[in-house]
Image (cartoon, helix red, strand yellow):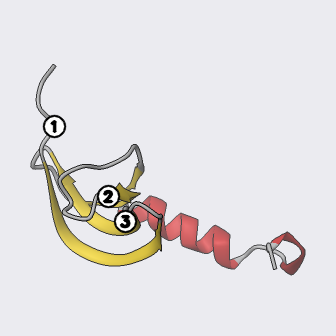
């Protein structure tokens, strides 16, 4: 299996942190030297290990934000 390379090109923010110090983050990540994508996943404190996650193109991220903003108040978790 080929090695997967990555570079966090921009740290956008921490969403949450678990008891072991891993953080769920939104970042721009370049996978295998490709254009960066928006990426949501858990990272170890030193960013050398990660969990499975999801990567989104610019268009997909904009659609996600649009869908989130358009939700009904009845659909919120509050």
Q: Residue at x 40, y 60 (%)?
A: 20
Q: CA distance from mark 2 to mark 1?
A: 16 Å
**Above or below, 34 relative to 15:** above
**How would you rate the neighbour count of disc 1 (Cα within 10 Å): few for under 14, some for 14-19, many for 20 or more?**
few
Disc 3 vs disc 2: which is toward the camera? 3
Q: Residue at x 65, y 72 (%)?
A: 68
Q: Which mark is residue 34?
A: none
Q: Quadrant of residue 66?
A: bottom right
Q: Residue at x 56, y 65 (%)?
A: 64
- Please provide percent x and percent y for residue 19: 47, 64
Which of the marked residues, 3 or 1, is nearer the chain's N terminus? Answer: 1
Q: CA distance from mark 3 to mark 1?
A: 24 Å
**Looking at the image, which residue sits at the far right?**
74
Name the element at disc 2: strand
For disc 1, the marked residue is 4
Front-most of 50 and 34?
50
For disc 2, the marked residue is 43
């Amino acid at each position: 299996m080929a090695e997967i390379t990555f570079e966090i090109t921009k740290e956008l923010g921490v969403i949450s942190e678990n008891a072991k110090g891993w953080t769920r983050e939104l970042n721009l990540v370049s996978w295998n030297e490709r254009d960066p994508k928006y990426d949501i996943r858990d990272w170890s404190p030193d960013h050398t290990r990660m969990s499975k996650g999801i990567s989104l193109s610019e268009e997909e991220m904009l659609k996600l934000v649009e869908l989130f903003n358009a939700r009904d108040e009845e659909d919120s978790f509050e």
